[in-house]
Amino acid sequence: MRLDKFLKISRLIKRRTLAKEVADQGRITINGNQAKASSNVAVGDELTIQFGQKLLTIQIDSLREVVRKDEAASLYTVKKEEAVN
């Protein structure tokens, strides 16, 4: 599954176009490597996303095409959440 699509479906980022912009700015890594919006993600991958002054590290637990809003958080596990100075 594409990175931008996963971020939208998991509701980490509201819109796919916004997910693409964040990836193009170099604020997302997959397993330590710089990610593009078109990068493929798989179960077990570790994503690090920079949201403003916050750095969020998650692990992908499952990939699904359609997810209800209340089930979206089950797609990933938050590993670490830290402030960036």
Image: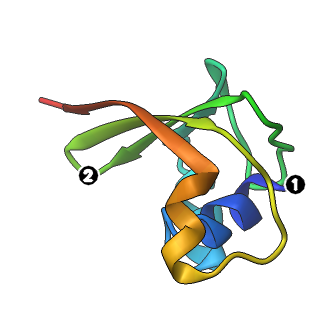
The residue pinned by badge 1 equals 1
Report the front residue among 26 and 62. 62
Determine crowd level at label 1: few under 14, some 14-19, many 20+ residues with C-alpha closer than 10 A.
some
Q: Earlier in the sequence, mark 2 or mark 1?
A: 1
- Location of residue 60 (image quadrant): top right
Q: Which mark is residue 44?
A: none
Instruction: Give x and y (percent) for residue 7.
Output: 62, 61
- Secondary structure beneath disc 2? loop
Residue 50 visible:
yes
Left or right: 73, with 62 as reference point: left
Q: Residue drawn at (65%, 64%), measured in percent from left and top?
A: 20
- Location of residue 81 (image quadrant): top left
Left or right: 85, with 35 as reference point: left
Left or right: 24, with 45 as reference point: left
Report the front residue among 64 and 82. 64
Image quarter in which the C terminus is found? top left
Instruction: Give x and y (percent) for residue 67.
Output: 70, 75
Instruction: Give x and y (percent) for residue 76.
Output: 57, 46
Q: Amino acid at mark 2?
A: Gly
Q: Residue drawn at (53%, 50%), measured in percent from left and top?
A: 25
Determine crowd level at label 2: few under 14, some 14-19, many 20+ residues with C-alpha closer than 10 A.
few
The residue pinned by badge 2 equals 52
Q: Is residue 23 above or below residue 50?
A: below
Q: Is residue 51 above or below residue 47?
A: below
